[in-house]
Amino acid sequence: MELSESNQAIPKQNDMVASVRSSSDVHVLSVWGKVIVLVGTVHVSQESADLVRNVIEEEKPDGVCVELDARRFEALSQRRKWESLDLKEVIRKKQLSTLLVNLLLASYQKRLGAQLGVLPGTEMLEAITVSKKINIPIFLCDRDVRVTMRRAWRSTSFIKKSILVSSLMLSVFDTEPVTKESLQNLKKQDVLSEMMQELGNEMPTLKEVLIDERDQYLAEKILQADGEKVVAVVGAGHVEGMKSVLQQTQRLDITLLDVIPPVSPAWKWVGWSIPAIVVGSIALIGYQRGIGAAGENALFWILANGIPSGIGALLAFAHPLTVLVAFAGAPFTSLTPVIGVGYVTAFVQAYVRPPVVREFQSVAEDIAILGQWWQSRLLRIFLAFLLPTIGSVIGTWVGGTRIVSNLF
């Protein structure tokens, strides 16, 4: 495998864009002194896999670019499964939300593939296999999926994050079979695009990160690939955007698209303001009415946070130690934005009830079955993360409102 990481000096356009000729799924562009054969595919279509094989064999390009990053390339080429994950490390790095979104996407894609009799990513595997067979270099042209997900997460408000996760959950649990008409619609957009279509107007920043930025990234990486003729295999939803980028009169600097934006300082102020208000209110109550009144309000805060968070852990059928940690930890984690109680309870649950290998192997199927969330140790960890968190949020609102109201 070869992969160009360099950013070449940006040449002047002149006559670099010579021509564009297209069929329904194959688009040939002569741009920037390079011939690019852009193949738009469906990630769960055998027809797309056959098309990719035929195009590569017929064109015999100098290189083949695929819409994969290093992690997804490894997963496809080596059949690496979810069981290779270090779940405790994921929790320690506070990446459990990102992992859940990735699992939901993988499950949705796998369900489509199962109904159509094709594994997700078959066309990418075909491109890799054919290229290796005839000794054509492979270039990985997509952005690291972790960067994409984190940029998307950081660009989305809390309310819209909730809408996003809810929509993903509904898509996963949707058992309506895929029809030929649906498959034709999928050819117009990749899976991420298809899932985001209805949310696009409400979440323009999310579409920008998941689709528009990746159009730019993919296009520039293809231009950086070695060789005068390159076949690029990408999801059909990226084709029009990439064609537009490739035909621009200026090359793009995509280094900024690899940067994960920091959390806004305003959110840090908001995060610390809640505990400051609560603790300050309790202290002021103690000053005005005595230590007994302060103690009563502090106890109310503990119970208001601990009880709903503990109930959340109970509803998750979590281990008794996890329930105890949810109850004891929520009142304190609610007073710091550094870590939420959900990450603490998820870590404890993963420690005392670690998932077994077969659950990692079947997680993409299990996640689409509601009952399996309580049967699978792996999915129960996600419940032990989500439900105590929801309980703590409720408790913080109830407890904080009551304590502040007692000042007056």
Image (cartoon, helix red, strand yellow):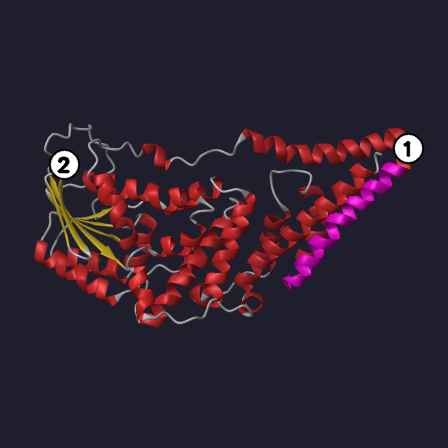
Residue topped by disc 2: 32
- Which secondary structure lies at badge 2? loop
**What kind of residue is marked 2?**
Trp
Relative to residue 335, is residue 357 drawn left or right?
left
First to last magenta residue range:
293-320
Q: Is residue 310 magenta?
A: yes
- Which secondary structure lies at badge 1? helix
What numbered label is drawn on residue 289?
1
What numbered label is drawn on residue 389?
none
- Image quarter for residue 270? top right
Can residue 245 be seen?
yes
User: At x 36% / y 53%, what residue is drawn?
Assistant: 193
Relative to residue 183, is residue 150 drawn left or right?
right
Looking at the picture, how far across and down is residue 156, in whole percent? 49, 42
Q: Residues within 10 Å of mark 1 (few under 14, many from 20)?
A: few
Looking at the picture, how far across and down is residue 339, in whole percent? 60, 42
User: At x 72% / y 54%, what residue is drawn?
Assistant: 308
Query: Which of 320 and 387 lies nearest the eye of the viewer?
Result: 387
Looking at the picture, how far across and down is residue 82, in whole percent? 42, 59
- For marks 2 and 1, the one nearer the N-term is 2
Query: Which of 285 and 14 lies nearest the eye of the viewer?
Result: 14
